[in-house]
Image: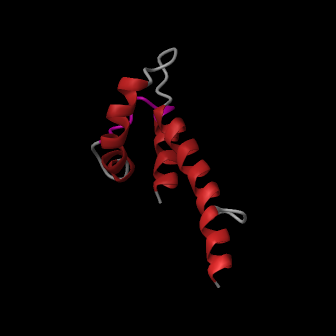
Amino acid sequence: MFSFLFIARIVMSWYPKIPVGKFPYVLAYAPTEPILIPTRKLIPPLGGVDVTPVVWFGLISFLSEILIGPQGLLVLLSQQVG
């Protein structure tokens, strides 16, 4: 679910004048902003572009593949138990 929210945040960043406090934009803004604020302290905007939603999308995709992908750790463990 957060992957889709971060994709929405990436698209929203292309349009800086979007009213993020209004529906439907607040649906993607409100749950992701608390995660992005501390990340922006570690990774400042590059050339005026906020890359933190891209970083989180990549991290979530990577962890998802490592844990529950076709050769993921949880899949392999469940095969060994069963």
Q: Is residue 16 magenta?
A: yes
Q: Is residue 23 above or below residue 69?
A: above
Q: Is residue 6 left or right of residue 24?
A: right
Going 72% across and 63% down the picture, which residue do you hit? 71
Q: Which residues are magenta?
A: 13-20
Residue 63 location, x and y as percent?
A: 57, 52
Give the image's coloring scheme. secondary structure
Task: Work out whether residue 58 or residue 69 is closer to the camera in this orientation and state it.
Answer: 69
Q: Main secondary structure of the magenta part?
A: loop
**Viewer-proximal residue, 34 or 25?**
34
Q: Locate the C terminus by quadrant.
A: bottom right
Q: Is residue 77 left or right of residue 53?
A: right
Camera-side residue of 20 and 64: 64
| Residue at the farthest front position | 81
Q: Is residue 1 above or below residue 58?
A: below
x then y, percent, for residue 79: 68, 77
- Residue 81: where, in percent of width, then height? 62, 80
Q: How many marks?
A: 0
Tell me where residue 66 appears, x and y as whole percent.
Answer: 63, 55
Going by the picture, which residue comes out furthest to the bottom?
82
Q: Residue furthest top?
A: 47
Residue lying at the far right in this picture: please name it.
71
Residue 54 as seen in the image, left or right of residue 73: left
Which residue appears at 52% of the width and 40% of the height? 11
Reply yes or no: does residue 69 show up in magenta. Answer: no
Above-or-below relation of 36 to 31: above
Residue at left 37%, top 46%? Answer: 32
